[in-house]
Each structure stands twice: as C-alpha cells, then as structure tokens.
Image: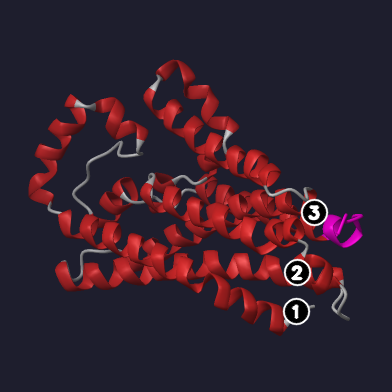
C-alpha cells in the first residue's frame, strides 16, 4: 500500500518546510514556557482584563498558577494550532494538487504504482508531517519545562493534551487532503479546503470574543479540542478528541477512495 520511492521523494522535497516550521514552533514554544511565573499571575490577569477581546481571541482566557494550564492557554489556544495549519495547507497542496496541475501525475501513474498506493502514500506523508510537529512540540515543552521549572509540569496530562492536538491536525489535514483529491486545479483546494480551515479558526476566535456569537463555536471542530476539559480529565473532552480523530480518518478515507476512482485529465 505504500510507495517507498514516492515517500522518500516527498521527504526530500518538503523537509525544508518541516524544518522551518519546527524552528518557528521552537521560538514560540520555548519563549512561552520561559514566561511562566506564578508571581506574574496578577499582572497577566490585569492585562487580560484591560484587553479582554485580544486575549480571548487567541484563546488566552485564563491565568493560572499551574504550568500546564498556562501552556494550554498561551500555546494551545491558538499558536500551536495556527502555525501547524499553515504547514498543513502548504504541504497538502504540494503533495497532490501540484502534481496533477503540472502534469507530473501522468508520469507517476504510468508506472506500475496503483492510484490507491499513490494516494495512501501521500496521505501517510502528510499525517507523518503532522505527527512530527506534535511529537516535537511535546518534547520541546517537556524538556524546556524540566530545565526551567523542574517538577512543575504534569507530564502525563500534558501528553494527553498533545494527543488531542494531533487530533486537530488530523482533522484539518483530512479536510485539506480530501479537497486536493477532489479537485485537479490547485486553486480549488486552496479556495475550499484551506479556506474552510481558516474559517473554522476565525469562527473560534469570534465566538471567544463576541458573547452573542458564542453559539457559533459549535460550527467549528476546534471546539472539540477542549484544553481545559482535558487537563481536568473530563469525559466530554476525551470524547471530543475521539471525534476529531474520526473526522480526520473518514476524510482521508474519502480522499483516497475518490482519487483512486476519479477520471484525471492528465
């Protein structure tokens, strides 16, 4: 089901993008961890009260004396969602739509490699990219926390938080991947899949800022990623994670199935 040659080719073509985003996540992740200081709680709370809309828009809705709640609010509220989303949009377009648009897919499909194998390999590459980002930020935050604040981070709960984060990545990447499989022209995946994901993020931000738009939070899968509920070990938060994984897997399955049967104009 997997083409090792194609997988290695994608790795060589996209590793620089992966490194760039790892560098960006390193900068923000280590910086936010270093900012943690329970003594600054009142100061941060005062800032949040003076600029409630800005703090709420980026998911910084609470100020806590625990390190894991601090990271969940200041990193997992938006930063660790938005930047990986950009990565997903870029890579999903490069691995499928770009080949079809440039005619490269014709040469690829002229080989004994089956369409289903091509589609599955490309899907696996995108998932692996998301997995690498997730594992990296997990290790980064745990290591940085251990150096700066030894013993302050609830590692077990933090790992579960990142399992949920990967669910968000799987859902968003599934949307973008499925979109690239449905359309031949790269502008359509950008226009539909990528735009839909961006809209989900904007809806989440608006629902956090505007009280009257609170109900709109149910129109975005990001609501299923309940960081506060995960930290508190709430069953509903775990169910949300499962739903995110289910959405992603189903969308990948639809994309692979459709690409394997579609009539390509190549």
Q: Which mark is first along the chain, 3 or 2?
A: 2
Residue 192 located within the stretch drawn in magenta: no
Q: Which residue is mark 1?
A: 2
Query: Mark 2, residues whose alpha carbon is within 10 Å: few (<14), some, or many (≥20)?
Result: many
Residue 70 located left or right of residue 204 = left
Distance of mark 1 from mark 3, alpha carbons?
Answer: 18 Å
Please tell me whether residue 195 is drawn above or below residue 102 in the rendered image: above
Task: Give 133 or 266, whichever is nearer the viewer.
Answer: 266
Q: Which element carries disc 2, helix, strand or loop?
A: helix
x then y, percent, for residue 109? 85, 71
Residue tagged 2 = 120
Nearer to us in this view, 168 or 111: 111
Residue density around tag 3, few if under 14, some if 14–19, many if 20 or more, within 10 Å: some
Residue 178, image x, y percentages: 73, 52
Q: Is 115 left, or right, of 81 in this rendering?
A: right
Residue 182 screen position, x and y as percent:
79, 49
Q: Residue at x 15, y 39 (%)?
A: 44
Residue sticking out furthest to the top: 212
Task: State the residue at coordinates (80%, 78%).
Answer: 1
What separation in Å lies between label 2 and label 1 (alpha carbons)?
Answer: 7 Å
Element type at marker 1?
loop
Q: Rounded to the nearest whole Å, what is the CA distance between mark 2 and mark 3?
A: 11 Å
- Whether residue 40 sits left or right of residue 180 in the image: it is left
Q: Residue furthest left?
A: 39
Q: Residue furthest bottom?
A: 4
| CB contact under 8 Å: marks 2 and 1 | yes
The magenta-colored residue range is: 257-266
Horizontal and vertical percent for residue 68?
Answer: 29, 56
191 vs 81: above or below = above
Specify the quadrant of the image occupied by residue 19. bottom left
The residue under label 3 is 254
Marker disc for residue 119 = none
């Amino acid at each position: 089901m997997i083409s090792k040659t194609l997988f290695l080719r994608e790795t060589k073509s996209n590793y620089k993008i992966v490194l760039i985003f790892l560098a960006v996540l390193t900068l923000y992740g280590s910086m936010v961890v270093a900012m943690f200081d329970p003594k600054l709680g009142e100061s941060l709370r005062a800032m949040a009260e003076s600029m409630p809309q800005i703090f709420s828009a980026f998911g910084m809705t609470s100020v806590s004396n625990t390190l894991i709640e601090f990271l969940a609010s200041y990193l997992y509220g938006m930063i660790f969602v938005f930047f990986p989303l950009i990565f997903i949009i870029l890579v999903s377009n490069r691995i499928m739509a770009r080949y079809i648009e440039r005619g490269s897919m014709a040469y690829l499909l002229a080989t004994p490699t089956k369409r289903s194998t091509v589609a599955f390999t490309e899907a696996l590459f995108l998932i692996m990219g998301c997995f690498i980002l997730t594992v990296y930020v997990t290790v980064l935050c745990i290591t940085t926390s251990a150096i700066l604040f030894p013993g302050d981070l609830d590692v077990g709960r933090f790992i579960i938080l990142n399992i949920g984060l990967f669910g968000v990545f799987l859902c968003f990447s599934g949307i973008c991947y499925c979109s690239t499989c449905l359309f031949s022209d790269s502008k359509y995946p950008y226009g539909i899949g990528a735009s839909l994901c961006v809209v989900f993020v904007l809806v989440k931000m608006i629902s956090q800022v505007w009280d009257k738009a609170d109900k709109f939070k149910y129109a975005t899968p990001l609501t299923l990623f309940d960081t506060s509920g995960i930290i508190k070990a709430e069953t509903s938060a775990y169910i949300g994670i499962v739903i995110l994984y289910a959405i992603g897997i189903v969308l990948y399955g639809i994309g692979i199935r459709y690409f394997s049967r579609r009539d390509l104009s190549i």
